[in-house]
Every structure is written in structure tokens, then in C-alpha cells.
Image (cartoon, rainbow, N blue to C red):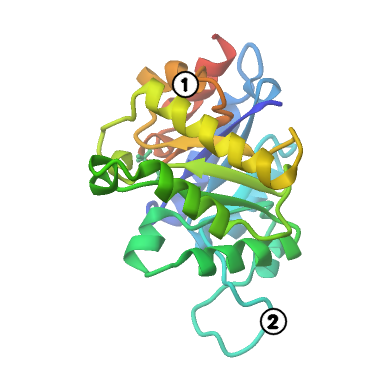
Amino acid sequence: MKKLIAGNWKMNLNAQKASALALDILKGLDDELPLSKVCDFVVFPPCVHLPPINQVIKSSEMKMALGAQDCSQHETDGAHTGEISAAMLADYGCTYVIVGHSERRQGHGETDAIVKAKAAAAHNAGLTAVICIGETDQEREQGQERDIVSRQLLASLPESSNAVNTVIAYEPVWAIGTGKTAKAEDVAAMHALIREKLSGRSGSSQTPRILYGGSMKPENAAELLATPNVDGGLIGGASLKAEQFLAIGRAVRDS
Ligand code: PEP
């Protein structure tokens, strides 16, 4: 399976800069050996920028996919001020949605149960849910990282999850936006654990892709993406610069 290179733009960029970034990435995907032949690419702009970015992507033969950074756990239209349903995101050309990012688990009180409901809503709308899990530095210092990640994983996966409609992003919270990256051997151990839990749950060797996220950049991407059981990256800061985002794809192509 191709590696998935996913760019989480978070709450950044105005409409014009967001469209320019999408265009620059799309231009870069066409270089000497087209990167989209070796990796799948998806970008997650802020919600208000989804319609223009959808247009940019459509006019470029859909060389990358579009995703949203969150969706509502509510599936039926109604009195949910400020919420955006997964079905609405699908209407705007999204095929992916991130759920349970640590910035939402920590900053917005999202529990595993809420993340699971959001992932189920995503599946019902035909979207692939990128379910984020990961331990804090304190949990790692106390040696609890395997228990925390296992619990989050199993409690956040809805019954509807399968290898196609779900992607797991292992993102140690202490590595997000800090410049600190997990050691390749720690990433390998955690991804092996996640893989084992996923195949134990489904009884099949066909499991969702498992991404690593946390300060991935061109300089460390080759090593991280070559680590066993790492099926791609969820990239924050480095996805805001087309050249850096593309360089992470090149790290896969040239390895
Ligand atoms: C993220 O937000 O999911 C992330 C991994 O951010 P960064 O790459 O900036 O650490």
C-alpha cells in the first residue's frame, strides 16, 4: 500500500494563502517522478477554506485528497450551533476527516467516546476517519504509554472501522509542534503494538494504515517513514510550506 502523507494546516492561513499553498503542492506533485505515484497525499485546511481548496484540487485532476480537521458527532441536521456534520464535509469534496487530535482531546475535552462517535459519523457519511491517539510526556515518564495508547485505540474505534475507512495516527503529544521527535525504535515499538491490537480486533492481517505524527520534517522523514509499520505521516508545521511537505514525499520516493 502507498504511504499516506497528510498535512494538518490547523488554524492557519487566510483564503488566498491557503489556495496558493494548495496550488504549490499540486504543482510539485508533478515533478520528474510524480510523487503521487508513490504516495497518497491529503491536506486538511481550516473548514472555511474547504470550498476554494476543493475547486483547486478538482481543477488539477484530483492529485491529492481533501480532508477536514474535525466533524460533529451529531449526524442529523438540527440544533447544534457551531457544529459541522460529516455529511456536510462530504458535500464539499472531503474524503477524510481527522478525529481526536490531541489539541481537541486536551483543549476541548474530547473523550474516547466522543472520538468514537465522530469516527462513526464520518464512516456513515462515507469519509475515512483519521483517528489520533498518543501519550503525554508525563504518561511516558511514568511508563504508561503502551496502556494509554492501547486504551485510546480500542475505545476510539467504532464497530464500523475497517482497513479502508480508517487511518490511525500515533502522535505522542510531547512531539507535536515541539521540534522533539520520537526515537525510531520507540515509534517502531508503538506501531507494532497498534498493528497487533488492530489485527487482534479484526481477526485479519488487513488493518488500517498507521501514521506517525509529531515534528516530522524533511530532515527526519526518511528515517521515520522507513520504520516498520509506519504507513505515512501526519504533518503539522512542515505542511504549511509546499517545499517541505513535498520533500517529505520525496523522502519516501527516494528511499
Ligand atoms: C499535528 O498537528 O498533528 C502535528 C504532528 O504537528 P507538527 O508536525 O507540527 O508536530
Which quarter of the figure is the N terminus placed in? top right
Q: Considering only order in the chain, which callout, 2 or 1, is on the residue closer to the N terminus?
A: 2
Q: Which image quadrant for residue 255?
A: top right
- Can you give x and y, in whole percent of width and height, for residue 31 in the image? 60, 17
Vertical arrangement, residue 160 with respect to residue 199, above or below: below
Ligand 1: quadrant of the figure: top left
Give neighbour class at mark 2: few <14, some 14-19, many 20+ (Cα, 10 Å): few
**Image point 36% across, 39% down: which residue?**
237
Q: Is 254 displayed left or right of 92 in the figure?
A: left
Q: Which image quadrant for residue 181?
A: top left
Q: Which residue in the protein does label 1 denote? A: 247
- Label 2 element class: loop
Q: Which residue in the protein does label 2 denote? A: 76
Amino acid type for the residue under numbered disc 1: Ala
Between marks 1 and 2, how big is the CA–CA gap? 41 Å
Q: Nearer the viewer, residue 25 or 153?
A: 153
Vertical arrangement, residue 90 with respect to residue 235, above or below: below
**Image point 55% across, 58% down: which residue?**
156
Asked if residue 121 shows in the view, the reply is: yes
- Label 1 element class: helix
Q: Which image quadrant for residue 168?
A: top right
**Image point 59% across, 41% down: which residue?**
197
Q: Are marks 1 and 2 in contact (CB under 8 Å)?
A: no
- Can you give x and y, in whole percent of width and height, for residue 223 in the image? 43, 16
Amino acid type for the residue under numbered disc 2: Thr
Of tags 1 and 2, which is closer to the observer?
2
Please give the label number shown on residue 144: none
Asked if residue 45 shows in the view, the reply is: no
- Can you give x and y, in whole percent of width and height, for residue 123 in the image? 71, 60
- Can you give x and y, in whole percent of width and height, for residue 92 in the image? 68, 61
Within 8 Å of ligand 1, the CB of disc 2? no
Q: Is 137 displayed left or right of 57 in the figure?
A: left
